[in-house]
Image: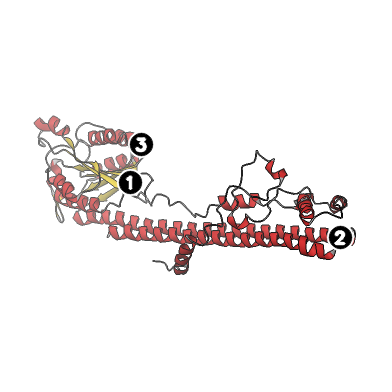
Amino acid sequence: MRTRALLSVLIVLMLVFSTGCSTLLDGFASDSNQSAAEKKEKKKPKVKIPEELQHIPLPPAGKYAGDRYDWQKVKQELNDIPKDASAKEVLNRMYELAAEDYRPVIRYYQNFDPSTIEVERGPNGELRLKELPGQKKVNIAILLDASGSMAGKVDGGVKMKLAKKAVKDFASQMPEGSDVSLTVYGHKGSNNKKDQAKSCKGIEEVYSLGSYHEKKFNQALDQFKPTGWTPLAAAMEKTEDRLSSQTEAENIVYVVSDGKETCGGDPVKAAQALHESDMKAVVNIIGFDLDNEGQKALEAVAEAGGGEYSSVDDGASLDQYFAEERSRLYDAWADWANEHYDKASDLSSKKYDQLQKKSNEVYDITQRELRRYEKMTDYLENERGFEFDFLHEKVNKNFRYRIDVIQEWNFDVVDHLQDKVLYNADKIQDEVLEKSDKEQEKLY
């Protein structure tokens, strides 16, 4: 498990988020200092003013705000201010000329998404087994050959007994979120010619598609013995019918067989139909103790089904096959965790930097606005003859206070959002690693 250096700090921050910082982004119904010009902007959606900014003027953009600023024109406007104007009248005139509109900034922060990533469906690897809440579910359809030849012996024991054990172990270790079914074929009648028709129709889903339950699955495995012929094509056709409604799921078919089709069907065509259908199933074949002819036949079936063919000769190699499947899935979970861990880190870093950039931009705007106000009051004092004390005590202090409040709010709200970004990234990373560890432990 990876070390997370920020975990303890971020837990404390999480507690802070729920209390002291709640007003940074909250807004209230109106701003009592809105100008008449602002009230006329009825078509624009209203911005909820945060509590920290409710007691200062937040007028719309002034006539010469931003890139429209023209000092020569501003001076002409300042010349129209009467010498007996009140401090409020002077301030309002200055705002009408050069005030910056901070409502878009408020809206930006209020709409900022501090989340990092949505965890995608877990790794499929060779198995494509994993689903996470809200993602595609996964169906595992196991088709087990119960024809008479499965009563034969190989190193390690009887083929059918070994196959049942391997299937049982495999099904019991399916990751969370996967459904499993077990279909057996060739277990009816006998392998005599007179019973061929009966045996070829002997296809039965002994464990219906659903969540794995150990007792019920084991009971299903105990219901049949190796008996008759090999209706592989018909078994896949029945599986296609059973999965036909599962078009929104990942569908994987595993066939365990020791022989080629003996009932006159076309398993290549059936596998291709499964793979090319709306449910897009993948057909994997495990050939058990096959001769060259049988192996080639089943290789063609797997290829047509978009899956893989694997050959096993005894009980040990059959167990090894499923162990390798689990190993691939184990590695896939590690890759999945690493990918999502890095994605969360990269995205949180990007969003953190976006917020810092925005904060710097807002600070620069406030500083520019402040310099313009100072230049205007200097002009009023030096060129228009306004009293220094009047401008300093009743005008300058007011617009400087407004700028100070906006700057402080800007710093605080960005700190708050940046902390949330880091917290969310760490939370996602913890969940991903925990989920990966859980699924890897389940495989062994």
Answer with left or right where residue 74 lies relative to residue 113.
right
Disc on res. 308: 1
Element carrying mark 3: loop
Residue at 53% from the left image edge and 60% from the top image edge: 21
Given residues 402 and 203, the one toward you in this image is 402
Residue 430, image x, y percentages: 41, 61
Q: Mark 1 or 2 closer to N-term? A: 1
Answer with left or right where residue 330 lies relative to residue 222.
right
Q: Mark 2 or 3 closer to N-term? A: 3
For marks 3 and 1, give the CA distance. 22 Å
Q: Say if mark 2 contacts mark 3, CB within 8 Å.
A: no
Disc on res. 386: 2
Residue type at numbered disc 2: Phe
Element carrying mark 1: strand
Q: Please rate how many residues cluster around mark 2, counting C-alpha atoms within 10 Å: few if below 14, some from 14 to 19, many from 20.
A: some
For marks 1 and 2, give the CA distance. 90 Å
In the displayed structure, would residue 210 be above or below residue 264? below
Residue 422 seen by the camera: yes
Residue type at numbered disc 3: Thr
- Quarter of the image where the N terminus is located: bottom left
Answer with left or right where residue 262 lies relative to residue 119.
left
In the displayed structure, would residue 120 be above or below residue 433? above
Element carrying mark 2: loop
Residue 347, image x, y percentages: 52, 56
Which residue position is annotated with label 3? 247
For the image, the number of numbered tags is 3
- Quarter of the image where the C terminus is located: bottom left
